[in-house]
Image (cartoon, rainbow, N blue to C red):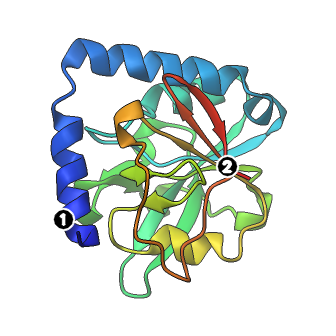
Amino acid sequence: MSKKELRNLQLQSLKLIDHIAFQQKCFRIEQLLFESPEWKKCKTVAVTISKPPEVNTWNIIKRGWEEGKTVVVPKCFPKNRELVFFELHDFHQLEQSYFDLYEPDPDKSTVLHNDAIELMIVPGLAYTDKGYRLGFGGGFYDRLLSSYSGLTMSLAFAEQMVDTLPIESFDIPVGMILTEKGRIDCD
């Protein structure tokens, strides 16, 4: 099965999660994150602004602010397939852009260099227990992770865990995955 077919299959599977189950799963994943030593230790966390059917990250961002963390979110630059992270202090800094994602408005935000990011929460559609992920198809995170040395983590529903994925030489696994069923250390 091609990556494109896997993406479509995974999206369909995620759309089948009913609203109450979705909310409960997100809550459990958030709790595991907030209790993790990685979250507790980091002062700067990178996270995408989620949109359904992804694990909700809006509450994670708010919690980061409450705890005094520096929260950074990515902006996609499709021309050179690059992600640039900007500090987010307020949801009013966001604009809807590339693929209808909410991203920081560069005119209202400050760039933060990747070296300052201690914990990067990496999005995806499917994951293996070795940390390999099926992304959304742009290759943005694989390019970024090839030169990133901080901690990496993904947040996923149990439905997103799969036995195998097509792995290519440039695919970079994440260090751990949190699902509503628990923590998976991938190293």
42 up-or-down from 187: above or below: above
| In the rendered image, the vertical position of residue 110 relative to residue 38, given as above or below | below
Image point (15%, 44%), residue name: 12
Which of the two residues, 105 or 73, is positioned nearer the viewer here?
73
- Could you give the CA–CA distance between mark 1 and mark 2, rounded to whole angstroms? 25 Å
Provide the residue designation for mark 1.
5
Mark linked to residue 186:
2
Q: Is residue 150 left or right of residue 7?
A: right
Q: Which residue: 44% across, 31% down?
A: 58
Residue 136 place in picture, x, y as percent: 33, 62
> Horizontal and vertical percent for residue 41?
84, 34
Amino acid type, mark 1: Glu
* Residue that sits furthest to the front in the current view: 163
For mark 2, give the secondary structure.
Answer: loop
Q: Amino acid at mark 2?
A: Cys
What residue do we see at 28% from left, 70% from top?
3
